[in-house]
Structure formats: structure tokens, C-alpha cells
Image (cartoon, helix red, strand yellow):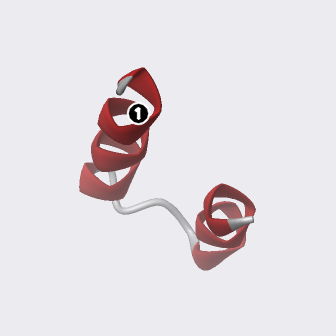
Amino acid sequence: SSSSKTIDALMKLELPSGVEVEIKV
């Protein structure tokens, strides 16, 4: 799904834990 691709792309960017929490929620 597109959402999975988005999360995968964001994880590759190694975003701050704050943004990481928002993604998990």
C-alpha cells in the first residue's frame, strides 16, 4: 500500500524519535 511505502521512506530518512512516534500512532 502507499502508506507502507511512505513509512518505509520516512524510516530510511532516519527521522527524529518525535516524528517516529507520530508515524507509529
In this picture, is 8 found above or below 22? above
Q: Quadrant of the rendered structure where residue 9 is?
A: top left
Residue 5 is situated, as x and y percent measured from the top left of the image, at 30, 33
Residue type highlighted by circle 1: Thr
Q: Quadrant of the C terminus?
A: bottom right
In this picture, is 22 found above or below 13? below
Q: Residue at x 41, y 33 (%)?
A: 6
Q: Which residue is more in the foreground, 2 or 16?
A: 2
Q: Is residue 6 left or right of residue 21?
A: left
Q: Is residue 1 left or right of residue 23?
A: left
The residue pinned by badge 1 equals 6
What kind of element bears circle 1? Answer: helix
Residue 7 is situated, as x and y percent measured from the top left of the image, at 42, 46
Question: How many marks on residues?
Answer: 1
Residue 11 is situated, as x and y percent measured from the top left of the image, at 34, 57
In this picture, is 12 found above or below 1? below
Residue 2 is situated, as x and y percent measured from the top left of the image, at 39, 22
Q: Is residue 24 left or right of residue 3?
A: right
Q: Residue at x 35, y 27 (%)?
A: 1
In this picture, is 12 found above or below 5? below
Which residue appears farthest toward the top when viewing the image?
2
**Mark 1 burial class by Cα count in 10 Å: few <14, some 14-19, many 20+:** few
Q: Quadrant of the rendered structure where residue 24 is?
A: bottom right
Which residue appears farthest toward the front when viewing the image?
1
Q: Which residue is more in the foreground, 3 or 19?
A: 3
